[in-house]
């Protein structure tokens, strides 16, 4: 073959292997192992979504709004422990996703937000192109762990791989990737992506682990406070519990150690009983936790002497002074600690007994405070842990009381809760959780007020045949706001008694099976029926018929920011 023919053959092969950036992004996502993508189609993302459809390697779930799509991708990421992917359009669409992206950022969810931009020649110039937001990158940066813009076709797939890597590297979080619409249409050579990129692990300093092991050997009543950053460290944390550590978790760290472990307070982390345990403890190791204001009386709650382990060095001593800080991956750090400790620690047995007592007292007190709703909480408790169901919770009175601690989880990844405190994300989160959990149905506990933000996504639930049982606690209005008004605002019910839709009609309009419960004894049979059926169901609990909780929940302690979760 002469040189000329060779060159022409190579050019022809390259042309055949060329496709649009949209095709390349769709193919690379599938090559990385992404199975499910959530989003809303738009003129500015059609090259990618058209390619996803044509290639047929990825399931695309059409959300009704970008806020819902982001919540779905977030919950999918949490439950599957893999990358969640959401695709939005530029401008309003990307902004619609921002509120839910705050939640993904709060929870450290590895979410890849692929969004777009107007044509490069109009970008950043405030030239009033349709869908343009002149400072879109500023908006995205504010709600992202990291932000990447693709400027040329040749770099698109590498930028995608980088974005996916950063999202999954501890401390994980949402990454926004902007691909201008004209770039999506450009031709680019096919590129091979070999699976999901491996993420680097931060190795803890051995000398600091030595120092920590010395502190633990001298302690008689050591505890672990486990946060969401410890979700990957379940085996090592449980081994430490077996050696005699007391355990307590944040809401996001639930079930890192089995919630029924005798040494664990579970997520009963801010009760009087818990504070008495902290007063007795002589060492607490905080692993992958922010020690959030709403779980520590705004950082005023007294904690023992602290050691902190975190993948993010900038978190050192942020909320509480710490005697020792260890930067590193939670699992590596706890395994390193285990390797340095004797098989049996010299733990004060009375301390461990007092933890078991505190936990039992807290559960009993909570059950009593639930009044008529205790059987409902018990029915859920019996199923959620045993059936390994994803347990999705909105910000409601029922979750702030029993959903976030009394109903036990089988595994940390199965707990999905609006950590940032934003109402109304549960309907969509449940769809994402269900897409990641085909073996066990997702159960979601909602409120009628918050649910109204996301009613459109009930159509998505039906259309995507999501295996979800929605439990709608309907007290006709913003229950917790009323309680706060009663406790702190002289009972003035400003803006809390909102109109509530007829959920039976709403469900009927989208073909969602619905059952209304007006007597608590009807709940469990209704739950069993819904669990046995295919696809989504809603059980509406008419709280005006059943009556109030035994004790009013009036939000966080006055002055503390955010709802206790
Ligand atoms: C996005 C957002 N908007 C407003 C609030 C303030 N807020 C907290 S709880 C709540 C009421 C929620 O009502 P509902 O979902 O019916 O639950 P309930 O309090 O009745 O249990 C409101 C408005 C919030 N936390 N998040």
Image (cartoon, rainbow, N blue to C red):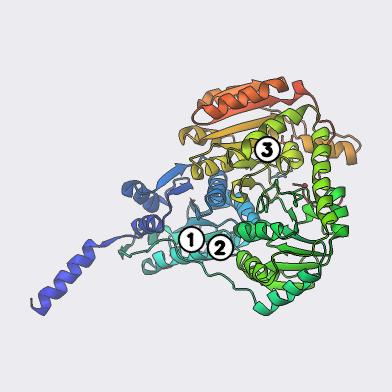
Q: Nearer the viewer, mark 3 or mark 2?
A: 3
Q: Which mark is residue 137?
A: 2
Mark 3 near ligand 1 (CB under 8 Å)?
A: yes
Q: Quadrant of residue 531?
A: top right
Mark 3 or 2, nearer chain start: 2
Q: Secondary structure at mark 2?
A: helix
Mark 1 or 3, nearer chain start: 1
The residue labelled by disc 3 is 450
Q: Residue at x 48, y 47 (%)?
A: 38
The answer to whether mark 1 and mark 2 are in CB contact below 8 A is yes
Height in image: 539 above or below 37?
Answer: above
Q: Secondary structure at mark 3?
A: helix
**Image coordinates for residue 90, horizontal then vertical, percent:** 50, 54
**Image coordinates for residue 376, horizontal then vertical, percent:** 71, 29
Q: Whereabouts is ligand 1, in terms of quadrant?
A: top right
The residue labelled by disc 1 is 178
How far, Cα to Cα, is label 3 from label 2?
A: 29 Å
Mark 1 near ligand 1 (CB under 8 Å)?
A: no
Q: Nearer the viewer, mark 1 or mark 3?
A: 3
Q: Viewer-proximal residue, 15 or 297?
A: 297
Badge 3 local density, few (<14 within 10 Å), some, or many (20+)?
many
Badge 2 local density, few (<14 within 10 Å), some, or many (20+)?
some
**Side (left or right) of 200 relative to 380:** left
How far, Cα to Cα, is label 1 from label 3?
A: 30 Å
Q: Residue at x 66, y 56 (%)?
A: 238
How far, Cα to Cα, is label 1 from label 2?
A: 8 Å
Mark 2 near ligand 1 (CB under 8 Å)?
A: no
């Amino acid at each position: 073959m002469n040189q000329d023919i060779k060159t022409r053959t190579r050019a022809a092969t390259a042309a055949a292997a060329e496709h649009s950036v949209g095709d390349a992004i769709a193919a690379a996502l599938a090559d990385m192992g992404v199975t499910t993508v959530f989003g809303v189609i738009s003129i500015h993302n059609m090259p990618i979504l058209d390619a996803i459809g044509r290639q047929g390697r990825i399931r695309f779930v059409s959300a009704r709004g970008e806020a819902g799509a982001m919540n779905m991708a977030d919950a999918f990421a949490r439950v599957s422990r893999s990358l969640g992917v959401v695709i939005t359009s530029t401008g309003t669409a990307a902004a619609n996703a921002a509120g839910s992206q705050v939640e993904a950022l709060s929870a450290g969810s590895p979410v890849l937000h692929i969004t777009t931009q107007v044509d490069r020649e109009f970008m950043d110039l405030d030239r009033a192109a349709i869908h343009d937001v002149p400072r879109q990158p500023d908006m995205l940066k504010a709600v992202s762990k990291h932000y990447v813009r693709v400027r040329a076709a040749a770099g698109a797939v590498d930028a995608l791989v980088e974005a996916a890597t950063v999202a999954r590297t501890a401390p994980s979080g949402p990454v926004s990737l902007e691909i201008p619409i004209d770039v999506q249409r450009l031709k680019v050579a096919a590129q091979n992506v070999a699976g999901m990129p491996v993420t680097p692990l931060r190795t803890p300093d051995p000398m600091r682990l030595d120092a920590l092991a010395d502190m633990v050997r001298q302690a008689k009543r050591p505890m672990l406070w486990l946060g969401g950053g410890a979700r990957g460290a379940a085996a090592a944390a449980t081994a430490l519990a077996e050696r005699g550590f007391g355990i307590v978790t944040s809401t996001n760290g639930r079930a890192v150690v089995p919630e029924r472990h005798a040494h664990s307070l579970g997520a009963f982390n801010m009760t009087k009983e818990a504070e008495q345990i902290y007063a007795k403890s002589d060492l607490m190791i905080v692993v992958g936790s922010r020690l959030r204001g709403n779980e520590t009386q705004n950082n005023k709650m007294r904690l023992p002497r602290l050691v902190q382990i975190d993948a993010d060095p900038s978190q050192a001593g942020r909320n509480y002074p710490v005697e020792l800080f260890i930067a590193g991956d939670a699992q590596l750090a706890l395994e390193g600690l285990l390797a340095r400790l004797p098989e049996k620690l010299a733990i004060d047995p009375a301390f461990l007994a007092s933890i078991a007592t505190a936990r039992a007292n807290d559960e009993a007190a909570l059950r009593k405070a639930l009044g008529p709703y205790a059987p409902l909480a018990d029915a859920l408790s019996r199923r959620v842990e045993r059936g390994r169901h994803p347990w999705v919770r909105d910000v409601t009175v029922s979750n702030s009381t029993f959903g976030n601690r009394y109903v036990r989880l089988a595994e940390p990844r199965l707990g999905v809760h609006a950590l940032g405190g934003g109402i109304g994300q549960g309907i969509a989160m449940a769809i994402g959780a269900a897409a990641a959990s085909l073996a066990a149905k997702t159960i979601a506990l909602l409120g009628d007020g918050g649910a109204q933000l996301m009613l459109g996504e009930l159509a998505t639930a039906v259309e995507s045949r999501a295996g979800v049982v929605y439990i709608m606690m309907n007290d006709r209005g913003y229950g917790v706001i009323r309680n706060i008004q009663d406790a702190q605002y002289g009972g003035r019910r400003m803006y809390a008694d909102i109109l509530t839709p007829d959920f039976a009609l709403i469900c009927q309009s989208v073909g969602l099976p619905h059952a209304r419960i007006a007597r608590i004894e009807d709940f469990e049979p209704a739950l069993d029926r819904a669990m046995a059926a295919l696809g989504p169901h809603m059980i509406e609990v008419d709280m005006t018929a059943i009556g109030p909780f035994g004790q009013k929940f009036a939000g966080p302690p006055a002055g503390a920011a955010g709802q206790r979760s």
